[in-house]
Amino acid sequence: MSLRKIGFLILCLMLGLSSCKKDDDATDIPQVVIRDRGEQQMADNDSIIKYLTTHYYNAGAFEGNTNPKISELIIDEIPESGVLPNATDKVLFTDDGIENDEVETETITFASVEYKIYFLRLNTGGGEEFIDFSDRISYTYEGSLLEDDDSVFDSAVTPVQSNLIGNGVDDGGLIAGFRKIMPEFKGAESLTDNGDGTFNFSNHGTGVMFLPSGLAYFANPRQGSGIPLYAPLIFKFELYKSFNNDYDNDGVPSHIEDIDGDGEFSIDPDDREKEGDDDTDNDGTPDFVDADDDGDGVLTKDEIKIRTVTKDTLEEVQNETLNLNEQLVEILKDELNNKFVGTIIEFTDTDDDTIPDYLDAD
């Protein structure tokens, strides 16, 4: 091999090594600066209010409609004239107070920040009970950007099932906005599986949520989703059915193991007594995934008593006489037999100290 060829090969090798080192040492990867949640909430709230006060929807299509479809929903910008196309159309949010507003509002606290949430109730749903924040739900949806509500980034036209809140290990659940707003709705009044992947339903929950980024993806949008950082979102949804989760299979539905009732599962390793701690025995595992909630060596399922009642009507189950320390925790409809089944737990208190046995280590 000639010296010229050898020199050329050496030069190529040096350039290759230099190029590799440059790539390895690259510092042009964009760094995400995490914004203050409180400040971002104020900006998002302004954006949502601006959107709501400049848009209307075809309200007439949903009056008396117990089977509303999100595909029937039209949300559009208010014409410059201020005159809506049809007499039954309504603005989403007026400027003169909330009593005439179509969109409902609530104030919640999440991640130590106070959020105002907004949702449009097209139909509450005729199911047995309102959704619990830790349920598994069957639903369809359509997600779009607030700033461009025609830009749908995700949807499901056939029902899917998701946990509203995850188990903290391999299931992260849905974004926070879903578990904050879904409890305002019920599933369908009746639901029949046709056995071919389709089903018939009536009087199901239908609505629209307008979410600030702090209750959506904030600084962590799904990769490839097309959702920008800190983007407020719109989700239209139809809710068909809910299922109580019992993540640790201890017999106590998970939503009951939210000790402070804030709609979140959390523990504070530095202050077990503070509000927001859901770990009774201070073992670092919150009760909803702890089979022995009080750490006394006796499983929670062995410190409660469960019974079921089957009645012809929902009202009969709801009016069932409960014994001392009993609680009606779930009502399901047996579609096959057209019956209603209620699950009742007796939270026994052997020593009568007002602390149920499954939470009492003494």
Image (cartoon, rainbow, N blue to C red):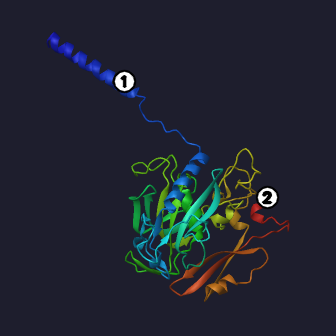
* Quadrant location, the N terminus: top left
* Quadrant location, the C terminus: bottom right
Q: Residue furthest left?
A: 2
Q: Position of residue 346 (x, y in %)?
A: 74, 73
**Relative depth, front residue between 73 and 140:** 73
Instruction: Say whether residue 13 is left or right of residue 223.
Output: left
Residue highlighted by disc 2: 361
- Crowdedness of circle 1 by 10 Å Cα count: few (<14), some, many (20+)? few
- Crowdedness of circle 2 by 10 Å Cα count: few (<14), some, many (20+)? some
Q: Residue furthest top?
A: 3
Question: Residue at 67% of width from left, 82% of height from top?
Answer: 318
Residue highlighted by disc 1: 21
Q: Quadrant of residue 329?
A: bottom right
Residue 244 visible in this rendered orientation of the protein: no
Q: Is residue 344 above or below residue 32?
A: below
Q: Quadrant of residue 83?
A: bottom left
Q: Residue furthest front?
A: 81
C-alpha span from label 2 to label 1: 60 Å
Kind of residue at badge 2: Ala
In what element is the residue under mark 1?
helix
Instruction: Report the disc number at residue 158.
Output: none
